[in-house]
Image (cartoon, rainbow, N blue to C red):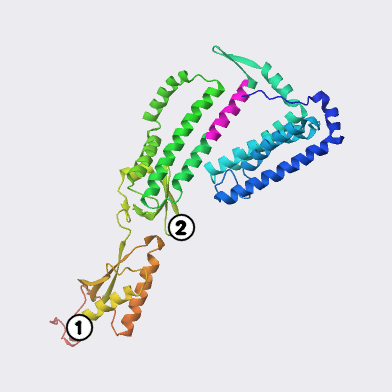
Amino acid sequence: MARLTTPAPIDDLGSWLQTFAQPGALLELGALGLCIGVAWAVVRALQRAFNPDAERSIWFGRRGVDGVLFPLLLLMLAYGARALTLLWAPRAVWQVVIPALMALVVIRIGVKVLEVAFRGATWLRPVERTVSWLAWLAAVAWITGLLPVVLAELEQITWKIGGTTLSVRTLIEGTLSAGAVLIVALWISSAIEARLLRDASGESLSLRKAASNAARALLLFVGLMLALSAVGIDLTALSVLGGAIGVGIGFGLQKLAANYVSGFVILTERSMRIGDMVRLDTFEGVVADIKARYTVIRSIGGRESIVPNELLITQRVENLSLSDPKVWQSTVVGVAYDSDVEQVRRLLEQAALEQPRVLRDPPPLAALSAFGADGLEFTLGYWIADPENGQLGLRSAINLRILALFREHGIEIPYPQRVLHVRGAAPAGAGDATARAPTGERPTA
């Protein structure tokens, strides 16, 4: 990392503050206002031309001025204005503005990239605040001239690791370089993911999701290697560490590795896609998202189940919409034995066809499925193409319509009938015979 210097040493802080009272400072302030106006106009024009997604735009943000492009463009214009006003102004304003703009650019890049890459993470807000505080403290130290003094003191604190001598300053600069490399890697991977997943649906969505996950993993690995090199770690020493990691994966991390491999297998084979209706054991729902380690399945009732990808590979999973989104449903109803069978079938099919969600091709079918103990049992089967919208409500609506049609046409739904046999009870009339029988004689049934 380049060594930071400041043109205003801390000893000259008083004289530097006095330059703000000179007339040349007004020229700098005017040039700064002009730079702000030009930067705002350019960003606004580019935002209207490209019409980016406000929720995922790193360059423009939501309002244009809260993205990365505005402070970056303003910083470039400020450097040009400082060079032009060098002959007429004392550069007092630019010594404050340029470090502040550099801190703002660092904050915007770090915060915006993390928001897009790790949307909804609980640790995101504390990290954003930490980055903001560190950037502003560095800017204040640069403006006041404390930064070179602090860096010089940190460079005196050294220790030796093997044949390499490290200082606190070298470690801090290497850490900042590593963070910058990882931020750039996350930025590129987020741009690739947004490009791949744009206007993707159906079968292509899962394949593009697999490609974006692979691209992010590759970029983060390359970024990590570059970051370790920036810190000063010899990458040749990682060969032993790589062997240890391999042994750890083979024993303790095999489940974790199996989940990651299974996730890529699911995405590449497209045996399960985002939006599919699946049933795993007794849990049924729609595949909401497929991550590298787990899959999110959302039920019709709103519950979300996080299923490890290994289970989706090794266990039986019913995909209700893999090759065909249509799902067959049925309902069973019983009628009296003296009912008109053809009329019952016609009314059952009519009740199903009156529901707009029931498909006409293939049409619903009512069949006499069993001779029950209490009456004739009919099974009404029908097809729907949107199981994600719920199945219980549709079945209830059809059952209510069946009940109304049966009552309208006088078709009886029989009550359950049971015959009760009591073992050991005397037959009917045996009590009277006993009363009339002479003493010592037994009645005969």
Q: Quadrant of the N terminus?
A: top right
122 to the left or right of 12: left
Question: Which quarter of the picture shows residue 91?
Answer: top right
List x then y, in percent, for residue 432: 20, 86
180 to the left or right of 235: right
In what element is the residue under mark 2? loop
Question: Which quarter of the picture shows residue 72?
Answer: top right
Report the residue marked by disc 2.
302
Does residue 6 sit above or below 302 in this rendering?
A: above
Q: Nearer the viewer, residue 91 or 305?
A: 91
63 to the left or right of 23: left
List x then y, in percent, for residue 229: 52, 23
Residue 179 in the magenta stretch? The answer is yes
Report the residue marked by disc 1.
428
Region in magenta: 170-184
What residue do we see at 86% from left, 34% from top?
A: 22
Q: Please tell me which of labels 2 and 1 falls first in the chain.
A: 2
Q: Quadrant of the C terminus?
A: bottom left
Q: Residues within 10 Å of mark 1 (few under 14, many from 20)?
A: few
List x then y, in percent, for residue 318: 31, 53
Residue 352 in the magenta stretch? The answer is no
Residue 54 shows in this picture = no
Callout 1, which amino acid? Ala
In what element is the residue under mark 1? loop
What residue do we see at 74% from left, 33% from top?
A: 84
Callout 2, which amino acid? Gly
Q: Nearer the viewer, residue 253 or 10?
A: 10
